[in-house]
Image (tube, grey):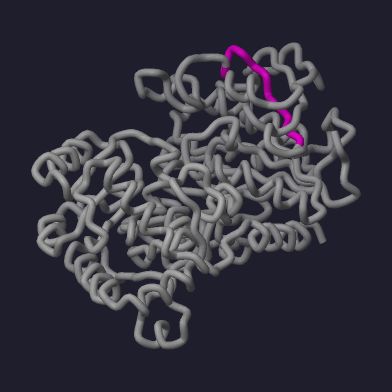
Amino acid sequence: MKTLPAMKVLFATSEARPLIKTGGLADVSGALPTALRSNKIDCRLLLPGYPAVLQGAREPRHCLAFEHLPSFGPARLLEAEMPDSDTPVYILDAPRYYQREGGPYQDSSGSDHADNALRFGLLSWMAAHLASDASPLDWRPDVLHCNDWQTGLAPAWLRFMGGGASSLMTIHNMAYQGIFPAATVGQLGLPAEYFQMAGLEYYGNLSFLKAGLFYADHLSTVSPSYAEEIQHEPLGMGLQGLLADRRAVLTGIVNGIDTAFWNPSNDLHLPCSYSARNLAAKKHCKQTLQEDLNLTVDATAPLFGVISRLTHQKGLDLVLDIAAWLIEQGAQLVFLGSGEATLEFALHGLAARHPGQVATVIGYDEGLAHRIEAGADLFLMPSRFEPCGLNQMYSQRYGTPPIVHATGGLKDTVIDATPEALASGQATGFVFMESSAVALQAAVARALGLYRDAGAWKQLQVAGMKRDFSWEHSAQQYAELYRRMTQ
């Protein structure tokens, strides 16, 4: 593996694009390490050996063998490179835990794997072992960077092992905490004396995420606003007290986006390319999207796009509440996503009642997601909470002003089209404060008013397209955080 004469970081994660992806964590894990390496940081990933990882990584080769790990059994460590970069990746090869059908966290029927505590307990143990003073690797990290509950036990293990690298725990979403019965403590071989409120215990259970938040040297999350919100109810999800106590070592850093993959000037998923200097071509993307989804081809109809998991968190029930009003305004709606059956049913019904004005596609299609970002005039993202969010940044990059609720990363990345922001040329979208259908409708009404002013609308589009959402800025902030942690 290529070694850089620089700070060394082990980036432990349960998924990383393009090898394995279920959500935004994979996008971060796939892009941030590469951006860090561009900033002279020797960052290497640690991933579970799922079938897709073993098949997709470049040149996996034997590194270490563990004949029998207490509580876990045998495992191997392979070393390889990511398929789309020279970023090194260590693969935890333990077929008993990772070679199975289904996804990283659930089986093919959609149920959580029954042994997830052991699966991600092992991942956490290996991360800590490789970052500890007893690591068998010649390469020793200065920082162990853990991500979400699946690696939450790693800072605790590292402490129990007697120390080593400094540890950073990044929270991508507080709603997922890795909570297991108290008996899991013994099954994992964790020290029983640490199963207490000032430690691993969470209301009588073991919480992987709490372990990380309690034992890590520093904490981060994926936007400054979310870092503040999780110190209070309800977004602290029961851990707000601990987070408030640790506010001095809690940092919010907004995620970046892959600006090469999400770039309307050379996006191969689009029927034609366009840019801030050539916005006229975006009209063809709209027409093609209307044709492909059997919407009435109408250049003047405001077309709203939605790409989302269909869950209560995402606030799509608010869109349904105002859908009749939107259709009365002559708007068209395109939905892409999957999730709760009630929302899927309601969105299918909406499309059936309004052919030509509403299209619903259940599932996920990468190409269609790009075409919606390009073909829509506006993007709806009324999430009740959103640690960071990515689609609002994609939308701005594609000249599709987003309409967002003022929460988390949405609040931090969209500049509301107030009269002052419009006058200064800084506005990039529309922000509403209260999570309600009334507030969403008022924001949409503001957006439709500006949409009818071609000159002002183009200014809004161009301002969004010129913003720098690349990983470079975020990577620089992480690099500075690592340096502060290791001084």
Q: Position of residue 202 (x, y in %)?
A: 45, 42
Which residues are the magenta region? 88-98
Task: Give the number of callouts.
Answer: 0
Q: Quadrant of residue 322?
A: bottom left
Nearer the observer, 174 or 464: 464
**Residue 424 magenta-highlighted:** no
Residue 303 appears in the picture as rendered: yes
User: Quadrant location of the C terminus?
Assistant: bottom right
Relative to 350, residue 255 above or below: below
Q: Quadrant of residue 50?
A: top right
Relative to 452, residue 363 above or below: above
Q: Position of residue 347 (x, y in %)?
A: 19, 42
Q: Is residue 41 left or right of residue 462?
A: right
Which residue is at a point 43% across and 59% down the rendered structure image?
A: 281
Which residue is at a point 42% across and 67% down the rendered structure image?
A: 411
Nearer the observer, 253 or 168: 253
Q: Is residue 10 left or right of residue 288?
A: right
Q: Position of residue 355 (x, y in %)?
A: 13, 44
Which residue is at a point 63% across and 62% down the rendered structure image?
A: 249
Q: Quadrant of residue 410?
A: bottom left
Nearer the observer, 135 or 282: 282
Q: Is residue 423 left or right of residue 169?
A: left
Nearer the observer, 348 or 238: 348
